[in-house]
Image: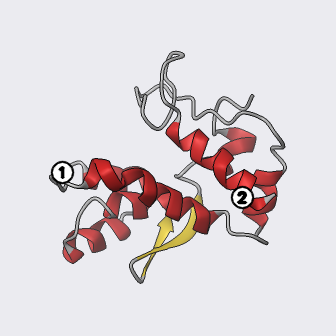
Amino acid sequence: MIDSFRDHYWFLSNFYPSEVELEDDLYPSVEHAFQAAKTYNQDERNAIRGAKTPAEAKKLSRLLPLPSDWNTRRVQVMRDLLRQKFSKGTVLARRLLETGDEELVEGNTWGDRFWGVCNGVGFNQLGKLLMEIREELK
């Protein structure tokens, strides 16, 4: 089991630098694009896209009200962004495939129990999406 997206497995993290597109705009990481997807306002998206770090992008998005449809579309938004990051034939796709059949668990200490697992509890939605994409690549 890979239980943390740090060190050798940092490339699995949404904070890892990897250019992705969201509605015709390029973002420096999955985290930037995912946080920008939480708003339909282009000025707000531009501010998030221009954040110096993924953590700053996340912080900026927390200042915004979530759209009413966010909970119904957030998993698909993440899936779409991850498919770009790990697109077939790329170095990152190869590295994802090199994880073999290991269970991928986004273990964290910040309490995210939807996308990851904290203190042994969580849905691990990010890990599940990564394993889904790994299967698609095989």
Q: Is residue 73 left or right of residue 130?
A: left
Q: Quadrant of the N terminus?
A: top right
Crowdedness of circle 2 by 10 Å Cα count: few (<14), some, many (20+)? few
Does 3 appear above or below 19?
A: above
In the picture as drawn, the residue positioned furthest to the top comes out as 119
Q: Secondary structure at mark 1?
A: loop
Quadrant (top left/top right/bottom left/bottom right) for the C terminus: bottom right
Q: Residue at x 23, y 55 (%)?
A: 69
Quadrant in which residue 49 is drawn? bottom left
Q: What residue is disc 1 on?
A: 63
Residue 1 position (above or below residue 90): above
Q: Is residue 8 left or right of residue 71?
A: right
Q: Is residue 56 visible?
A: no
- The quadrant holding residue 91 is bottom right
Mark 1 nearby-residue class (10 Å; few <14, some 14–19, many ≥20): few
**Foreground disc of the pair 2, 1:** 2
Secondary element at tag 2: helix
Q: Which residue is mark 2?
A: 136
Residue 116 is situated, as x and y percent measured from the top left of the image, at: 50, 33
Amino acid type indicated by mark 2: Glu
Q: Position of residue 132 (x, y in %)?
A: 65, 49
